[in-house]
Image: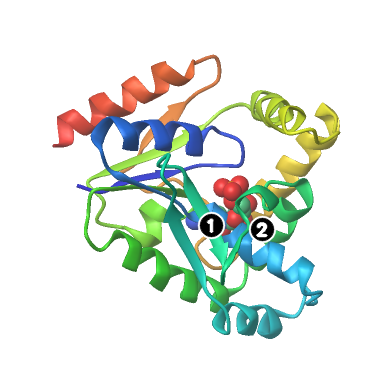
Amino acid sequence: MNIAIDGPAGAGKSTVAKLVAEQLEYLYIDTGSMYRALAWAVITKQVDVEAEQAVSDLLKQNHITLKRDTDNQQHIFWNDEDVTDRIRTPEVSKFASVVASYAPVREQMLVLQRELAVAGNVVMDGRDIGTHVLPDAEVKIFLTASIRERAERRLQELLQKGHQTDLAALEAEIAERDKRDMEREVAPLRQADDAVLIDTTGMTIPQVVERILEICKRSG
Ligand code: C5P
């Protein structure tokens, strides 16, 4: 069985997807981290983010890989470089949604993501998993929450990591990223027709996980 979890920025997808994967002993795949790794490389290698071809070539000429360490934590590599801790900044978030709007970039990511899911039993989260990457996934979830709640959750995450920011700036950043993700031409963020909508506003993480596990049980 494959489980697709999509939704806007900060809806709690990765936290919840990781826990669901642990419970079911499935492989968790965070597709956002792949777009983030490319964005990190664009910034670090000083590639013009507006130059679609150059960004696509950068991806073509390098390797993004996901590996698990001994603690079962997922690490993301750009070639041999572990970039896991460097891709969670607001700057990378913004660049990620720009590079993710390019068709040749998405085509390459789609191939990589399908390869990762080929053996089955994966929980994959992103924006277009239920609609494009794994349209045959047995369980599809669309997770959302109010923009205020999503910004507050992101604020706590960033503060814990020592990044300075404020709620209003985060709300604006999330709104801008959602808009870009929903309005792009290729594989925009939208709920698949057969996905179950879960609004996590006011819900705890264990409640959301429980809800998804119930849905999996019904489908399994
Ligand atoms: O999920 P996360 O916030 O880490 O994703 C970063 C960005 O990558 C998103 O804003 C979106 O533009 C892009 N993305 C995407 N398709 C996916 C996963 C992420 O376009 N499947």
In the displayed structure image, the side of residue 127 where residue 220 appears, left or right: left
Above or below, 77 against 148 in this view is below
Q: Is residue 60 visible in this depiction of the protein? A: yes
* Residue found farthest to the front: 70
Query: Residue 97, how many percent across, how many down?
Result: 66, 58
- Identified by mark 1, the residue type is Ile
Q: Is residue 25 above or below residue 127?
A: above
Q: Quadrant of the C terminus?
A: top left
Residue 182 appears in the picture as rendered: no
Whether ligand 1 has any atom under 8 Å from the Cβ at mark 1 is answered as no
| Residue designated by label 2 | 97
Element type at marker 2? helix
Which residue is at 32% across, 58% downward? 134
Residue under the image location 62 percent in, 85 percent down: 57
**Residue drawn at 53 percent across, 32 percent down:** 12
Mark 1 vs 2, N-terminal side: 1
Q: Which residue is mark 1?
A: 76
Residue 160: where, in percent of width, then height?
Answer: 72, 27
Question: In front: 205, or 140?
Answer: 205
Q: Is mark 2 within 8 Å of ligand 1?
A: yes
Hey, which quadrant is residue 146 in on the image? top right
Say which of 28 and 9 sits in front.
28
Look at the picture and state if 186 lies above or below 148.
below
Q: Is residue 43 above or below residue 122?
A: below
Disc 2 marks which amino acid?
Ser
Q: How far, Cα to Cα, is label 1 from label 2?
A: 18 Å
User: Does dot 1 land on a helix, a strand or a loop?
Assistant: strand
Please give the label number shown on residue 20. none
Q: Is residue 39 left or right of residue 165?
A: left
Residue at 67% over, 52% down: 87
